[in-house]
């Protein structure tokens, strides 16, 4: 069983190992930044990245996908930590907000495991392509905008002009190395070469620029990156009254849903890039287990990271080993390698993320204008704007799916046809074409007027079907209207599924099926 944890799935050991080291270096500043957003110590975010990455890769998350502490989760739990600290100050309990956080993350993990057990991960297949494009574009813009914070000091002001120029040049050099180095050789990931090259130049004093050490000091710390392996913590000081229960469980549910949506969207993106297929339900199980253990060991939780996953894929990481190496390397950085890692220039990591932005943005979107239906373009733009405006990826996806569903319902309602047939004396037959459902029943019902029809009316469903309760209720209402006018309506050529639906609803609706309705049997070949 232990060998299953590190068995090579795709790619090769060398690529996965080098790619994992690259990802580990890029994880450090992001985990620190997300810790500040969540109002916790940087080590809480760093250890969350370790546990999330290792457990998801080991327990069956999508190969090649990187999980860790994320901004989406940090935003959700940040207010919870504040309220917990306020409650702790009133009771004289120090760092009660952290206990609120750990409890919420563990509960979120349980919710995600249940999501996987119930096999609800398949719902990601319902996300339309325009929503996916808008999500990816919005994410690229969010990543781009987030990088500009690195060009500011702790007070939020822009760095002096000379420092800005140095950072800009270093970022450009990093991007140039990433772009041109593969033309020389693919033996080593170009991103790793870029980070180590610029990092060594900074470490040996060839120039002065903002480093990870400065970022740590900017958050009120000592500038050191060092910590021991965490031990299990239990939120025993929480008073579980009604208000606290709703606060923690509500936050846990939000964090679980945000994590699931972001992870499954990342999974689908990596599937498209690598032309392979991950398992959504298995990913939910792995993410849930990782969040539970992350909370238990004092981490802020997280989910799949699109930016880091793209770095991993671009660097050649395809198997689970890349995620395991990234998490183990990050743990070593925290416990041993901190004094060296803190000297890495922030500009090098910014340059890496700029390249990720270029690779993430769906440039094909610009070619869709005037070539695809307007409502698809509207959905793409709406999801992009919501993603950028709210920085809430889950909300953007939910809104996009709802908009797409409404557009589909509206367009489908236009494709219901009702053709009149008076070939039989004394009987009028209406041949229905399309799907009868909540969006089309009103127009369908308005076309049937009892005063204009003979005493016998048949609605032929040979080219149509009944889809929901709204359509059943509409048929029931039509039957009653004709009955009140002294006329009779019957249904013909119902499919077995439609007939079964009507039969099961016989206690709620009353419709009549024609006696001459044929029963279809499989042909003997």
Image (cartoon, rainbow, N blue to C red):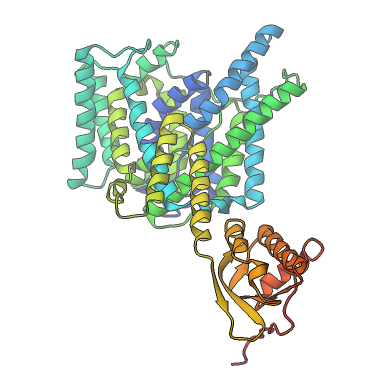
Horizontal side of 110 relative to 182 (left or right) equals right
Residue most extreme to the front: 451
Horizontal side of 318 relative to 475 (left or right) equals left
49 up-or-down from 510: above or below: above
Horizontal side of 509 relative to 498 (left or right) equals right
Residue 262 rendering spot, x and y as whole percentages: 50, 40
Which of these two is toward me, 76 or 232?
A: 76
291 up-or-down from 417: above or below: above
Q: Looking at the image, which residue is at 66% across and 30% down?
A: 250
Residue most extreme to the right: 507
Residue 105 rendering spot, x and y as whole percentages: 62, 31
Residue 326 rendering spot, x and y as whole percentages: 43, 37
Q: Is residue 11 visible?
A: no
Q: Please identify the quadrant where the C terminus is shown.
A: bottom right
Which of these two is toward me, 284 or 286?
A: 284
Q: Looking at the image, which residue is at 67% across and 45% down?
A: 114
261 up-or-down from 330: above or below: below
Residue 203 rendering spot, x and y as whole percentages: 27, 20
Which of these two is toward me, 89 or 79?
A: 79
Which of these two is toward me, 141 or 330?
A: 141
Q: Is residue 29 visible?
A: yes
């Amino acid at each position: 069983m232990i060998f299953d944890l590190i068995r090579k799935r795709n790619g090769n050991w060398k690529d996965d190992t080098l790619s994992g080291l690259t990802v580990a270096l890029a994880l450090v500043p992001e985990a620190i930044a997300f810790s500040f957003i969540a109002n916790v110590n940087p080590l809480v975010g760093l250890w969350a990245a370790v546990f999330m990455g290792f457990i998801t890769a080991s327990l069956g998350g999508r190969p090649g996908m990187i999980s860790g502490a994320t901004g989406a989760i940090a935003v959700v739990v940040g207010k919870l930590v504040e309220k917990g600290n306020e409650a702790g100050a009133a009771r004289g309990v120090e760092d009660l907000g952290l206990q609120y956080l750990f409890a919420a993350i563990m509960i979120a993990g349980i919710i995600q495991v249940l999501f996987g057990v119930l096999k609800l991960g398949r719902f990601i297949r319902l996300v339309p392509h325009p929503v996916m494009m808008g999500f990816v574009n919005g994410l690229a813009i969010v990543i781009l905008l987030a990088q500009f914070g690195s060009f500011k000091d702790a007070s939020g002001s822009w760095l002096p002009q000379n420092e800005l120029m140095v950072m800009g040049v270093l970022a450009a050099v990093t991007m140039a190395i990433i772009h041109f180095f593969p033309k020389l050789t693919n033996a080593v990931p170009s991103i790793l070469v870029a980070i180590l090259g610029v990092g060594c130049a900074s470490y040996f004093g060839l120039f002065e620029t903002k480093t990870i050490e400065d970022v740590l000091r900017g958050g009120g710390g000592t500038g050191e990156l060092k910590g021991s392996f965490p031990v299990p913590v239990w939120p025993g000081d929480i008073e579980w009254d009604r208000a606290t229960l709703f606060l923690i469980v509500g936050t846990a549910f939000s964090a679980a849903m945000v994590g699931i949506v972001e992870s499954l969207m990342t999974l689908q993106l990596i599937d498209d890039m690598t032309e392979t297929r991950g398992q959504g339900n298995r990913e939910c199980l792995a993410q849930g287990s990782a969040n539970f253990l992350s909370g238990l060991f004092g981490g802020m939780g997280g989910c799949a990271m699109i930016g880091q996953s793209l770095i991993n894929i671009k660097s050649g990481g395809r198997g689970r080993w890349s995620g395991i190496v990234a998490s183990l390397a990050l743990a070593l950085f925290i416990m041993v390698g901190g004094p060296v890692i803190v000297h890495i220039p922030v500009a090098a990591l910014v340059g890496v993320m700029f390249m990720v932005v270029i690779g993430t943005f769906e440039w094909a979107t610009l070619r869709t204008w005037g070539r695809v239906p307007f409502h698809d373009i509207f959905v793409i733009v709406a999801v992009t704007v919501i993603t950028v405006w709210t920085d809430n990826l889950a909300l953007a996806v939910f809104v996009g799916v709802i908009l797409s569903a409404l557009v589909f319902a509206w367009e489908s309602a236009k494709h219901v046809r009702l053709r009149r047939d008076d070939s039989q004396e004394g009987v009028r037959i209406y041949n229905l074409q399309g799907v009868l459902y909540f969006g089309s029943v009103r127009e369908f019902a308005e076309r049937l007027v009892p005063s204009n029809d003979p005493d016998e009316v048949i609605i032929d469903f040979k080219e149509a079907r009944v889809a929901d309760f709204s359509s059943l209720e509409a048929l029931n209402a039509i039957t009653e209207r004709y009955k009140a006018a002294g006329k009779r309506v019957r249904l013909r050529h119902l499919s077995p599924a439609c007939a079964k639906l009507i039969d099961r609803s016989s206690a709620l609706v009353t419709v009549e099926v024609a006696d001459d309705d044929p029963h279809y049997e499989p042909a003997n070949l």
